[in-house]
Image (spheres, helix red, strand yellow):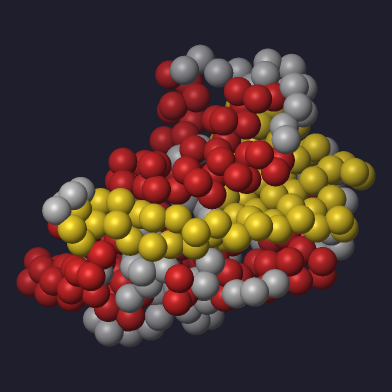
Amino acid sequence: MEPALQKRVQRYGWDKAAVFYENYWHRNLSPAQDKLIEFAAIQPGEHIIDIACGTGLVSFRAAALTGNKGQVLGTDISDKMVELSNKQASERKLTNIRFERSEAETLKVPRESFDVALCALGLMYVTEPGLALSEMYKALKPGGRAVAAVWGRRQNCGWAEIFEIVDRRVNSEVCPMFFYLGNTSVLDLHFANSGYKDLRSVTINTILTHATDEEACGAAFAGGPVALAYNKFSDAVKEEAHAEYLESIRKYKDDEGYKIPGEFVITMGYK
């Protein structure tokens, strides 16, 4: 997919997914976010940038850790994500956090102005993840640290057929490189190529839980990376895609709902 088209798909796709994202994914993404926050070891008063921040699930945690003497900037390609995050910050009367629309590959921030750079499950959608990591590197002060989390290997993510199911119903691949960074040492290599030193990496196996068919489909289609394509489907095509996806995860269903295997990779490096 051409980079410009991929960015357009991600920008407007996440605009569509924004209102559903937290309800469907907050709980299931927490293992990766918890480890990313642990690696970052944010200290009071630090300045932090959170790339591809979504609705600010990690950004707000970072703001609580750095406190009123620190600052957090969350950036995302989606206008709707930024709007919802700024609304939440205003409602909570937080003065140490703000959100701006920005592409990860072209950060419009002063160089060497942040102590910590974060990217929680956003690099999979970036056209050039190495360039995004380089932009984070430029934004860091000397000695600063970056932490990124991505989804792991395709074979270890039981929900992975969602992309093929959608791709069969559109003219181009939705997320052609989604699992690439989760392959062994690939994220580490991108960190190293971007200049980071003293790398630390961990792989986490997890279980995604959905209580009902409706919840499983909502997370996969309405609240995730295929949202733009999905919203263009007719009701009949949506029902057909739902049925095919539910069949692909049927083996993970029991009396309590779905328990779908997943995998995260988290890497940290220093400038």
Specify the quadrant of the image occupied by residue 195: bottom right
Residue visible at 68% across and 73% down in the picture:
186
Q: Position of residue 177 (x, y in %)?
A: 52, 76
| Camera-nearest residue between 15 and 180 | 180
Residue visible at 60% across and 70% down in the picture:
181
Compared with 10, 257 (above or below) is above
Of all residues shown, which one is farthest toward the front? Answer: 255
Q: Position of residue 26 (x, y in %)?
A: 40, 42
Q: Position of residue 155 (x, y in %)?
A: 45, 76
Residue 259 seen in render:
yes
Residue visible at 92% across and 44% down in the picture:
142
Compared with 267, 55 (above or below) is above
Of all residues shown, which one is farthest toward the left? Answer: 236
Q: Position of residue 165 (x, y in %)?
A: 27, 78
| Camera-nearest residue between 141 and 259 | 259
Q: Is residue 84 left or right of residue 200?
A: left
Specify the quadrant of the image occupied by residue 36: top right
Of all residues shown, which one is farthest toward the right? Answer: 142
| Camera-nearest residue between 75 and 141 | 141
Residue visible at 74% across and 49% down in the picture:
146
Total number of numbered labels? Answer: 0
Residue 79 seen in render:
no
Q: Is residue 60 left or right of residue 133?
A: left
| Camera-nearest residue between 232 and 267 | 267
Compared with 169, 36 (above or below) is above
